[in-house]
Amino acid sequence: MKMNLPPLTQAFVLHFGEMGSRWGISRTVGQIYALLFLAEEPLNADDITEKLGFSRSNVSMGLKELSSWRLVKLQHKPGDRREYFSTPEDIWEIVRILAEERRKREIDPTLSMLRQALVETPATAGERHAQERMAEMHGLIELITRWSEDIQKLETQTLIQLLEVGSKVQKVFEIKDRLKVVAGGKSRRRAKDEGPADV
Amino acid sequence: MKMNLPPLTQAFVLHFGEMGSRWGISRTVGQIYALLFLAEEPLNADDITEKLGFSRSNVSMGLKELSSWRLVKLQHKPGDRREYFSTPEDIWEIVRILAEERRKREIDPTLSMLRQALVETPATAGERHAQERMAEMHGLIELITRWSEDIQKLETQTLIQLLEVGSKVQKVFEIKDRLKVVAGGKSRRRAKDEGPADV
DNA sequence: TCCTATTTTCAGAAATTCCTGAAAGTTCAT
DNA sequence: ATGAACTTTCAGGAATTTCTGAAAATAGGA
């Protein structure tokens, strides 16, 4: 109930509690993660209980959920039986793990539902149209997913560089035609006489 | 309670109902959007009520929420007083709007909380460390946000091309040094003697 | 083995979120 | 101004999710 934290940390923890509940995770899980993220050293469950002021069992559940997301690392201190939890040092690693897990839990099931729907034979014009929409969505998700899988393989440093360049994305893109020469023109041809999108 | 939909559509609608509830939106709102997304023509509130089988007032609330996210377009048919709702034709437009709204509602408040925390003077070593972590997070969010803002400005067709190229991201990146010549070397220099990330 | 420190589970209490029907509000044609 | 067609609001009931304390499980040491 009552938190036991320096004010700076407390503001952060409360904020991520709220954010968490807008996403799929509960407020407490969000707070636990926020606390671990800021902590200088790994914390054990009792530390967390004491600092955040909710029940020991709630902390246990929360840590279990975070583990299932692979978001916390577990370690032991010599001569201490308790388990200590921490977050990855590299914050980009956290983003990577999050993206992977979300893909596994949300994207993949969605894709398979869509594929299933796409092999059915539509009975009416309405159904045919629905199927077309689903095909569009399937294509979009596949494209984004594949792209982000590639991205995730990059090392942190490389990724940051890429994003920094990306801020000048138009320019990267202007380069693209030149790129074809290098990459060997594997992607399908797409000329400027293809109609533009109607937004 | 009982839905009145062709089976193909129904599977899709149910799926996005579930997905919706994993994100911030409620099951019904997810279902309404899924239905509109597949619909051949704009639907009015009574159509939706009839097809999804929940109360008229719930549909009204749902549509209101979708409007607040700018995810539905409102239009009128001549000689009909009712309001008709539809989703954007271009599915990438939907992604764009979603990203913008999430930024407004989640990213911006987070950034301002972080900035606030970063100007405080830390009292202890622990607080100083916490502040450093927050600074890392602030940097990460800014980088990603700025990048995605740029991306969002691109037209659909351009964006798709870019993502397709992006699948060969390593190659794009190898090109980067060449790019500097073109872009005029505006980004800060970063040589290979800077240490790599330790993941 | 038994004891102790620690973690996990789980039934139900508490809190939150969602949904509905009834009533009020709007808008437009007459 | 009235009434018909339609939409929105909102109090409170229903459903879901979260949290807790008590009890059970586990693991290590004597």
Image (spheres, coloured by chain):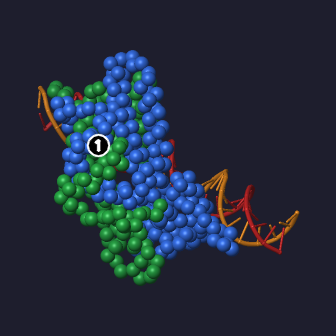
Chain colours: A blue, B green, C orange, D red
Q: Residue furthest bottom?
A: B123
Q: In the rendering, at what x and y percent does residue A119 appear?
A: 44, 23
Q: Residue at x 45, y 44 (%)?
A: A103
Q: In the rendering, at what x and y percent does residue B137 appear?
A: 38, 64
Q: Quadrant of residue A126?
A: top left
Relative to A109, residue A13 above or below: below
Q: Quadrant of residue B124?
A: bottom left
Total marks shown come to 1
Q: Residue at x 42, y 56 (%)?
A: A155
Q: Which part of the image, by quadrant, shows the N terminus of chain B?
A: top left
Q: In the rendering, at what x and y percent does residue A61 appear?
A: 58, 57
Q: Pointer 1: residues within 10 angstroms few (<14), some, or many (20+)?
A: few
Report the chain holding disc 1: A
> What amino acid does circle 1 point to?
Val
Q: Is residue A55 visible?
A: no
Relative to A8, residue B67 above or below: above
Give the SS element for disc 1.
Answer: helix
The residue under label 1 is: A182
Q: Residue at x 32, y 64 (%)?
A: B191
Q: Residue at x 56, y 70 (%)?
A: A43
Question: Does residue D11 appear left or right of residue B77 in this picture?
Answer: right
Q: In the rendering, at what x and y percent does residue A64 appear?
A: 58, 56
Relative to A40, residue B68 above or below: above
Q: Is residue A84 visible?
A: yes
Question: Does residue A166 appear left or right of residue A112 in this picture?
Answer: left
